[in-house]
Amino acid sequence: MIAKMKKYGIISYAKDFPNFLDSLQDLGLIDITQTLCSLEGEEKKILNWLSFCNDAIKRLEAYQAEKQYKIHSIYNPRKAAYILKEYQKAASEYEQIDEEIKQRDKRYYELLPWGEYDPSIVEKLGENDLDLLFFTCDKRNFDPTWSEKYDLEIVNEEKGIYYFVIAKSKHHEKITIAANEVKMPSISLNRQMEEIDVLKLRHAELELLFKEMIPYLPTLYQERTRLQNALSFDRIATCTEFSVDDTVRITKGFIPEDQEADFLTFLETQPVYYTVLDVEEAESIPVLLKNNSFAKLYEPITKIFSLPNHKEMDLTPFLAPFFMLFVGFCAADAGYGLVLVLGAAFAKRKVSADFRPILSLVQWLGGATILFGILSGGFFGIKLAEIPALSRFTNYFLDEDNLMILALALGGVHIVFAMCLNIVGITRRRGFKYAISKLGWLTLLLSSVAVFGLPELGVAISEALMTVYYVVAGLCGLAIFFYNTPGKNPLVQFGSGLWIAYNTVVGLLGDFLSYVRLFALGLAGSILGMVFNSLAFDMAPDIPVIGALVTLIVLLFGHSLNFALVMLGAFVHPLRLTFVEFYKNAGFEGGGREYKPFIKIKNE
């Protein structure tokens, strides 16, 4: 669900505003509406320092992974500023040297086929009216007549390329041949390598300097937090309204309705005037999702596409069970599901609390994968129905025909459920009369499925029921073609109804068939798993230890690859079914702005 928001306006004297804003940031409840404003000099300075701080932390954390260092935990702003300045100088020099080494290494290896030579000799030849020109040419394009026409000497041949030199008098006409002339450096290869070694030595010295900064990582963490809070404070301070000749500041923002009491208690302690403001029709109200512990795990899935806007329903609790089932259907291997559940359980002990909800989600998805793996009888590519010890359970495993029917049935339920949500959403936002046409489509669809589907299952439909169906279908047709846009001309509505009918029929058919992918992906993963199992045992030589080792290697490699492919498909395709088929039929609009309270970040 979406938390209800209330908008408040707060007026404070300009001289009291900084202290009030600091207290407001400590409270961390209000999402402040900012006016458009440009970055000021102080804000740019904070951004630059924050960028340096993030860069320093990222680099030092990478070095810290190599070895454990004693950490200095006492925070000192001056010490932090000094460390960042030193880091800035060292990082700038490090990047320059790094780029210089890359360029010189590239040039060195380009010239290496020429071998060592003394540039001073080339210069002396030039003083004596003789030039040495260096060329490269593809062996296939080399013309032997060049050797007859010029003083040419082939120096080297490497990878089908000729490296050759032509000596000519300075007064000789310019040489024009189908070859690439190479400009040789003014220093020898040995001298180049010595200079590269000097650069690499300085490179290593700077890396050592970075490692010496590692003990001050906690200081940099706290400095980053200070800068983030300062940046947030400065933006709000700069982008709130002035009034009454700049003597007062006006702050507007939204708070969750269930936290209004705490907010009012805080305001009573401040030297400010406040009032509840009306929300304008076109105003963007921040969205805060509030769900139970299960649905909350799926909120990151919702945020991948878009948050709902403040006028519509939060679809997270409704998409959650379907998304979980779809992932399980696409993976459909009890062994892979077991890997997800156990792997996430192990990882929970190694990661911070912020990442544990993601791992809990993985466990739920793993549980669904185990469920569909049991239903389809798959365990690491092994068909459980073919194991003699499990032969008595063969009838309980679903075959391919039943799995395809189940996939389409799930798709039908998914689409119908989305249509129901669309009707509820339209009724809540605009009124029931605007949902009558949608209700007509839903009723016509369900009644048609019942009338034409039940006889296929052996259930007879009486004449009376058929008469009722024709009456219901007629009423639904009236709603569809003559009440799709209440208030407009009936002829306009009829034309609109024809267009909507065409799009709806074609769209529903395409949406329904899209769910075949659930069955197809599950089947593909199962077949690929069986193929790797067969390869593992067929490729193994008939040598006791080596054969078992080859089998194990092929099994590990094959199932690791298959697991990665299956999990990728099992995540992407349910996303597609959710964001296209489900969202479209549920009338999802999206475009919501996330609730981001003005809050002071705390150090971990």
Image (cartoon, grey):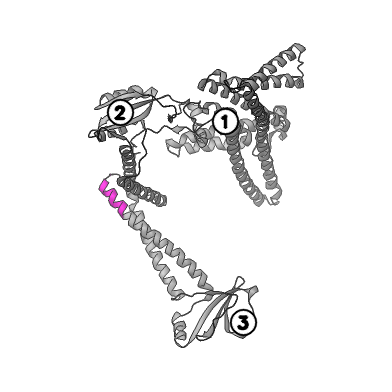
Query: Distance of mark 1 from mark 2, alpha carbons?
Result: 38 Å
The magenta-colored residue range is 73-85
Decide if residue 504 is on the left or right side of residue 199: right
**In the rendering, at what x and y percent does residue 214 appear?**
35, 51
Of tags 3 and 2, the one toward the viewer is: 2
Q: Looking at the picture, does residue 149 appear above or below residue 343?
A: below
The residue lying toward the viewer, choosing from 529 and 161, is: 161
Mark 1 is surrounded, within 10 Å at the Cα level, by few (under 14), some (14 to 19) or many (20 or more) other residues, namely: many
CB under 8 Å between callouts 1 and 2?
no
Of tags 1 and 2, the one toward the viewer is: 2
- Residue 74 in the magenta stretch? The answer is yes
The residue lying toward the viewer, choosing from 461 and 592, is: 592
Amino acid type at mark 2: Ile
Ranked by sequence position, the earlier of labels 3 and 1 is 3
The residue lying toward the viewer, choosing from 129 and 88, is: 129
Q: Which mark is residue 583?
A: 1
CB under 8 Å between callouts 3 and 2?
no
Residue under circle 3? 146
Q: Secondary structure at mark 3?
A: helix
Location of the C terminus by quadrant is: top left
